Image: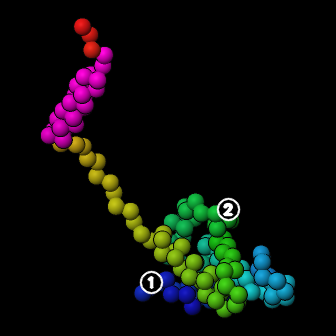
Amino acid sequence: MLQISAKITIPDSEIEISAIRAQGAGGQNVNKVSSAVHLRFDIKASSLPDFYKERLLQLHDQRITKSGVIVIKAQKYRSQEKNRDEALNRLRDLIKKVTLRRKKRKPTKPSRSARKKRLDRKSKRGKTKALRGKVSE
């Protein structure tokens, strides 16, 4: 059972985990042991609330397929158990990320005194540069 929040959990039956061989360096261990983990989670067939499903399906994340399946591959560690925990943590983080709402931006503009100071600095800088010109006789 994967605990997302105090009220929301995902049963293990909805998460499909399979062990595969890891890629990359590691010598003989990589060729013999299936330490990497492939996690698959079908959003549409899950018991998540509709709010979560809609937000997950709207995410533009490369781990979510067009058919609405989250695919996570974890191969950071040499042990299958640690990779399994890593994959489950990544799934939890992805689902939690969907629940956060961004603050709406309040449009602002500079104050009158800030605009005046900026223009004064510009004109002062321009005068300084004008004084660097050639001296006429």
- Indicate yes or no whether the magenta region holds residue 77: no
**Closest to the observer, 136 or 18:** 136
Against 53, residue 11 (above or below) is below
Mark 2 is surrounded, within 10 Å at the Cα level, by few (under 14), some (14 to 19) or many (20 or more) other residues, namely few
Q: Is residue 134 left or right of residue 54?
A: left
Q: Position of residue 70 (x, y in %)?
A: 64, 72
Q: Position of residue 78 (x, y in %)?
A: 71, 87
Q: Quadrant of residue 120?
A: top left
Residue name at image x 61 percent, y 73 percent: 43
The quadrant in which the N terminus is found is bottom right
Q: Quadrant of residue 74?
A: bottom right
Q: Quadrant of residue 109?
A: top left
**Closest to the observer, 88 or 3:** 88
Residue name at image x 29 percent, y 48 percent: 107
Residue at which label 1 appears: 5
Q: State the colouring used for the structure image.
A: rainbow
Residue 66 is marked as 2
Specify the amino acid type for callout 2.
Lys
Residue name at image x 28 percent, y 52 percent: 106
The magenta stretch is 112-134
Q: Position of residue 44 (x, y in %)?
A: 61, 72
**Closest to the observer, 26 or 54:** 26
